[in-house]
Amino acid sequence: MTAAIIDFQMPVLQAADSPRVQWENNRFHVEPGLDEEEVKSAELPANTQLVLWKEKNMFFGGFHTLMAAESGLIEGAGDWRRSGAVGEF
């Protein structure tokens, strides 16, 4: 999710809620939210199984982060997939 923040300039909360992918044991797992036709047309290595998940899931891990905003304030996001939360103090 760091790429979502750095490469795509997403706010941390949007990055934490963005669809995830995971490549493991010749399986390419994809959460919903990405363009399904584009995902299906991707050139994957031979013997790679494409797994399209029906809903976002804890399988894809948890992304919890804090980041200094340009304003000098600290922004945070807790991934609901892992019961993450951000508090104010």
Image: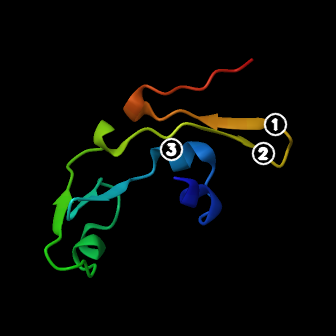
**Which residue: 32% across, 37% down?**
58
How far is disc 1 from disc 3 in space, using C-alphas? 18 Å
Question: Which quadrant of the figure has residue 86?
Answer: top right
Question: Which quadrant of the figure has residue 40?
Answer: bottom left
Residue 39 drawn above or below residue 32:
below
The answer to whether mark 1 and mark 2 are in CB contact below 8 A is: yes
Residue 26: image x %, image y %?
A: 20, 65
Horizontal arrangement in the rendering, residue 5 relative to residue 80 (left or right): right
Return the residue found at the far top: 89
Residue 6 drawn above or below residue 79:
below
Residue 25: image x %, image y %?
A: 21, 59
Kind of residue sitting beneath label 2? Ala
Q: Secondary structure at mark 1?
A: loop
**Which residue: 34% across, 45% down?**
60
Horizontal arrangement in the rendering, residue 48 relative to residue 77 (left or right): left
How far is disc 2 from disc 3 in space, using C-alphas? 16 Å
Q: What residue would you read off at disc 1?
A: 73
Q: Can residue 4 be seen from the camera position used here?
A: yes
Q: Secondary structure at mark 3?
A: helix
Kind of residue sitting beneath label 3? Ala
Q: What residue would you read off at disc 2?
A: 69
The answer to whether mark 2 and mark 3 are in CB contact below 8 A is: no
Few, some or many residues within 10 Å of mark 2 (<14, 14–19, 20+): few
**Which residue: 38% across, 53% down?**
20
Residue 6 drawn above or below residue 44:
above
Horizontal arrangement in the rendering, residue 75 relative to residue 1 (left or right): right
Q: What residue would you read off at disc 3?
A: 16
Kind of residue sitting beneath label 1? Leu
Residue 29 drawn above or below residue 61:
below
Residue 54: image x %, image y %?
A: 20, 49
